[in-house]
Amino acid sequence: MKSYWQSFWTLLFPRICVSCQQALAEGEYLLCTTCHFELPRTQSCLTGQSTIAEKFAGKIPLTTAHAYLKFQKGGKVQHLLHQLKYNNQPEVGEWLGRLFGTEINTAGITADVLLAVPLHESRLRQRGYNQSDCIAKGISEVTGIPLETEVLRKKTATSSQTNKTRIERFQNVENVFEIVKKSALEGKSIALIDDVVTTGSTLEACAQVLLENGCRELHIWTLASTL
Ligand SMILES: [Zn+2]
């Protein structure tokens, strides 16, 4: 039973849906039931039809490549990612990661280790957490695949990828990632986790150093994709 103070607190600060701002009912978490139902899932894990796999085809050898949600400008997914990245809500990433993890389990896909695309330390200090780590944490909780956080490092701070051409994006992230713990990936099946894939240049740069350093097979799992 709810305590008097809990009810009082809820009355003063009602929990609201991060997408439509309606009050949440008891048992709902972050999204109301309607918004949850309307999340634009790609279901690529389940159908095997992955647009991001096509994006990387011929560039990096990947065992699987999946995005859980479709990113649309002004849509629910953009709103959720905004909460995660700019509104100090790491729990949004963990929660979506758990949903994604459930789908990965259903599809029977697995890996040895999860690695999140790292942030440069200046950005990490500014945000307080790496949003891709939050997503990976959620996936790890549900799939049981361990998350390693001290393997991959972004050694150079880069300017934003937004408003850059495709070529500029690739040049911007070239040689900015390095391996700090090679033993964690040698001979392993690695799943690389990111928040949203657009051109794929950041993921490609990460994938390259992983494959050059003894990673046996590579998966790319992103929370969302602009495709
Ligand atoms: Zn809602």
Image: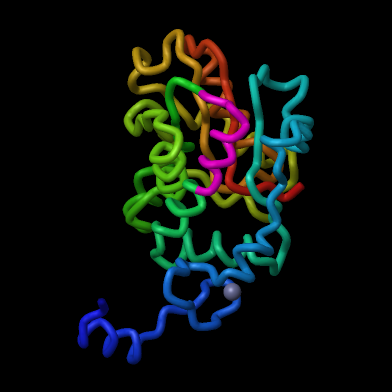
Q: Is residue 138 left or right of residue 161?
A: left
Q: Residue at horizontal 25%, vertical 76%?
A: 1
Quarter of the rendered structure image containing ligand 1: bottom right
Q: List x then y, in percent, for residue 48.
A: 75, 31
Q: Residue at horizontal 73%, vertical 30%?
A: 53
Q: Residue at horizontal 77%, vertical 38%?
A: 51
Q: Is residue 127 left or right of residue 75?
A: left
Q: Is residue 31 left or right of residue 126?
A: right
Q: Residue at horizontal 58%, vertical 26%?
A: 109
Using the image, determine if residue 211 lies above or below residue 203.
Answer: above
Per the picture, the main secondary structure of the magenta-coloured stretch is helix
- How many labels sit on residues? 0
> In front here: 124 or 53?
53
Using the image, determine if residue 219 lies above or below residue 98.
Answer: above
Q: Name the image quarter holding residue 89.
A: bottom left
Q: Decide whether residue 141 is among the magenta residues.
A: no
Q: Which residues are magenta?
A: 99-110
Q: List x then y, in percent, for residue 119.
A: 43, 43
Residue reaching furthest front? Answer: 1
Q: Decide whether residue 109 is among the magenta residues.
A: yes
Q: Name the image quarter holding residue 79.
A: bottom right
Q: Name the image quarter holding residue 198.
A: top right
> In front here: 25 or 184?
25
Q: Is residue 208 left or right of residue 3?
A: right
The type of colouring in the image is: rainbow
Using the image, determine if residue 184 lies above or below residue 172.
Answer: above
Q: List x then y, in percent, for residue 196.
A: 61, 47
Q: List x then y, in percent, for residue 27.
A: 43, 69
